[in-house]
Amino acid sequence: MNESGIGRSGDRMNEGCIGIWRLVDPEIELVDQAIGRSKQLFSRSADHPLTRSNAHPTTRAPEHPVTRSLDLPITRFPHQEGFTLFEVLVSMTLTGFLMVALLIGLRVANRAWQTGEARLRLVHAAAERNAFLVKQIASLVPYQVASSDPQLPGRLTVLQSSALCLRFISSYSSIYRGHSGLVLVEYGIVHASRGNIELALRETPVGEDDVLYHKLVRSVTTDPETGVQVINYRPFSVATTDLRLMTGLSAAWFEYLDLHPKKGAGPVWREDWQSSDEAPYPDAIRLRWERAGESGEELVPVRAR
C-alpha cells in the first residue's frame, strides 16, 4: 500500500473518531502538535442549548446522601467506633444477672434485718416484763382484813401462795400508776391450750375489807387434828381483760423460800406457803418457767414482815 492510501485511510479513521467524539461533546479539544497547545476541534453556535446553559449557569441540586452512599463501597473506617450485636446481647445478659443477684441480696438482707428487729423487740419486751414482775412482787405490802360475816369469821393475811396462783397486796401497778393507793395483785398460771401455758395478771383496786375478803375466800374450815382454821381460797380463772405477761410456756410454777423451817433444816423452797403468826410471809418468791427446751427464773426477795 502506498503512502497516499495510508493517508486516506488515516483521514477516514480520524473522521470516524471525530464523528464519535462529536456525538459525545461538540466542543472536544485536541492537542495540536504543531503549536504544542490544545485547540478546539469543533465549535458551537451561539444559540446551541449547551452554549446557552453555559452562559447562564444554574445551581445544581445536591445529590442525596443515600444516592451517593449507594455509589460508595460499604467499608468500616478506622476512626468509626461501636459494638456488634453479639457484644450488646452479652452485656445485656450480664447486666440482667447482676440485677437479679442484687435483688436477691437485698431481699435476704431485708429479711435478716426484720428477723433481727423482731428478736430484739422480743428481748426488750421480756426484759421489761421481768423487771415489772420483780418490782411489783418486791412492792408487797403487809395487809390484813377482818370479816363481819358470821359464816366467814376471823382475820385474814392477804397472801395466797401456791404453785399456780399468787395473790397479795402491792403498791405498784401497771394499770393504776397514776392513782395513789393499793391494788390486789393476782398472778395465775393457766392452760390456754394443749401444751400452751400462760402467766396472767389481774389487778383490782383495794376497797372495803368485806368486799376484798369475799373476793378471795370461798370458805373457812377447821382442821380436826390441830384445830387451826383452814382458809379455802377461790380458784383463779382467767378473764378476757387479764394481762398475759408470758405466753407459749411448756411449764411454769411459783416457789417460796423458807429460811427457818420448824425441823431445823436448811433453807427450803416450797411450792405452797401457809401464813402463820411467826412467819406470815416467805423470805423470797421465785417464778420458774420452761419454753421450747429452755428454762428461766426470776427471784424476788420479800421485805414485808
Image: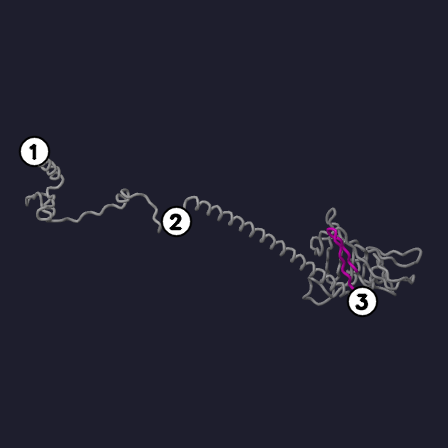
Q: Nearer the viewer, residue 133 or 49?
A: 49
Q: Which mark is residue 61?
A: none
Mark-to-mark CA distance, 1 and 2: 72 Å
Left or right, 133 with reference to 97: right
Where disc 1 sits, the SS reads loop
Decide whether residue 87 is among the magenta residues: no
Q: Quadrant of residue 148?
A: bottom right
Magenta-colored span: 286-300
Q: Residues within 10 Å of mark 3 (few under 14, many from 20)?
A: some
Tell me which secondary structure the magenta stretch mostly adopts: strand
Q: Position of residue 102 (x, y in %)?
A: 53, 51
Where disc 2 sits, the SS reads loop
Mark-to-mark CA distance, 3 and 2: 90 Å
* Nearest-to-viewer mark from 3 and 1: 1
Residue lying furthest front in this view? 2
Give the labeled residue for mark 2.
Answer: 82
Tell me if residue 266 comes above or below residue 45 in the rendering: below
Q: Earlier in the sequence, mark 3 or mark 2?
A: 2
Residue lying furthest top in this view? 1
Which amino acid, by three-letter code, is at mark 1?
Asn
Q: Earlier in the sequence, mark 1 or mark 2?
A: 1
Q: Residue at x 87, y 57 (%)?
A: 230
Q: Earlier in the sequence, mark 3 or mark 1?
A: 1
Give the labeled residue for mark 3.
Answer: 304
Give the labeled residue for mark 1.
Answer: 2
Which amino acid, by three-letter code, is at mark 3?
Ala
Q: Classify the position of the N terminus by image quarter.
A: top left
Decide whether residue 298 is among the magenta residues: yes
Marks 3 and 2: CB-CB under 8 Å?
no
Q: Position of residue 236 (x, y in %)?
A: 77, 54
Q: Position of residue 226 (x, y in %)?
A: 93, 58
Mark-to-mark CA distance, 3 and 1: 162 Å
